[in-house]
Amino acid sequence: MAGGGQAAVSFLTQIAKVAAGIGVAASAASTSLFTVDGGERAVIFDRLRGVLPGTESEGTHFLIPFLQKPFIFDIRTRPHSFSSTSGTKDLQMVSLTLRVLSRPDVDRLPEIFNSLGLEYDEKVLPSIGNEVLKAVVAQFNADQLLTERPHVSALVRESLTQRAREFNIVLDDVAITHLAYGPEFAQAVEKKQVAQQEAERSRFLVARAEQERRAAIVRAEGESEAARLISEATTTAGNGLIELRRIEAAKEIAGVLARSPNVSYIPAGDNGQMLLGLNAAR
């Protein structure tokens, strides 16, 4: 019975050793493997040599446990938006919002990790974006930002792409999504519109006065010519024309009075008496 118990203990001990070995092997295997998903790259940090120069692509890879450590980078294009308040050439304040689509330069990932770390885009893009926006906006007047917006966007895109390239960042697209002026500019625009309306009104008054002056001249010339013709006709034909005009005027006045209901005619002379509203018997 004693020999059987020792055999059982020895068997269990062997099983425990095998299980421990399997556990150690599994743990070592799990720590020596890592997976890189699609759209990602891995940079390996070696405790003896530092950041290795190459990168690991998608798939499962081996490393030396406790000596090497992988750092995963997302290399897909990602959007970023940031705002900036800048001064224009004519000293107006403008608020702009810029949207960029960025991704890291895959061949330069070890350099990016050494200099900037995993959050490279959050450290670089807002600062260089504000710098470029202020530099470009300062070259234009406030109204030119609207009339020449494609040109402004092209300058921002070109300058920001060059600055991002210095940090090994690739920009696929750069666009100005929002543009707003300060209250001072709105007041200046309103005053300008009022001044333009006043100028238009002044020009209209001047033009109307000029037309009235010309009309008065023409009317005076016409009256002078009419007076001359009447004088010549009077000299040639005597006062007959004047008498004719007097008769025509009297005829016109009589016609107007005849059509008026408020005018009554009373015959002249002693024999033409007319009693209105009186009883003849009285």
Image: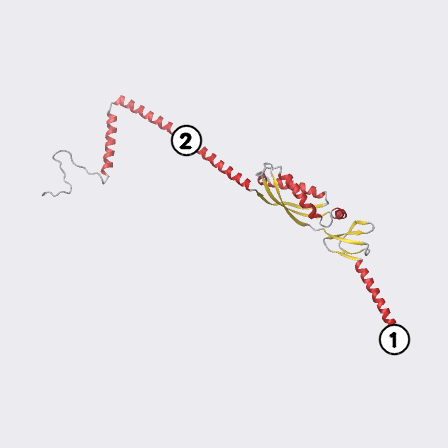
Query: Could you tell whether 197 is left or right of 145 in the image?
Result: left
Q: Residues within 10 Å of mark 1 (few under 14, many from 20)?
A: few
Q: In the displayed image of the protein, which residue is found farthest to the left?
A: 281
Please name the amino acid that badge 2 sits on. Answer: Ala
Residue at 83 percent of width and 65 percent of height: 20
Query: Mark 1 or mark 2: which comes first in sequence?
Result: 1
Query: Could you tell whether 249 is left or right of 89 in the image?
Result: left
66 above or below 115? Answer: below
Q: In the displayed image of the protein, which residue is found farthest to the top?
A: 235
107 above or below 138? Answer: below
Q: Are the residues tagged 1 and 2 within 8 Å (C-beta)?
A: no
x and y percent of residue 96 in the render?
61, 44
Q: Secondary structure at mark 2?
A: helix
x and y percent of residue 245 in the render?
25, 29
x and y percent of residue 22 in the render?
83, 64
Q: Secondary structure at mark 1?
A: helix
Residue at 47 percent of width and 35 percent of height: 198
Spatial distance from mark 1 to mark 2, Cα to Cα?
132 Å
Q: Residue 127's image quarter?
A: top right
Q: Residue 64's image quarter?
A: bottom right
Q: Which residue is mark 2?
A: 209
Residue at 87 percent of width and 71 percent of height: 11
Please name the amino acid that badge 1 sits on. Answer: Gly
49 above or below 135? Answer: below
Q: Quadrant of the C terminus?
A: top left
Q: In the displayed image of the protein, which residue is found farthest to the bottom?
A: 1
Task: In the rendered structure, find residue 101 and report the number of the disc placed on it.
Answer: none
Q: Which residue is mark 1?
A: 5
Q: Nearer the viewer, mark 1 or mark 2?
A: 1
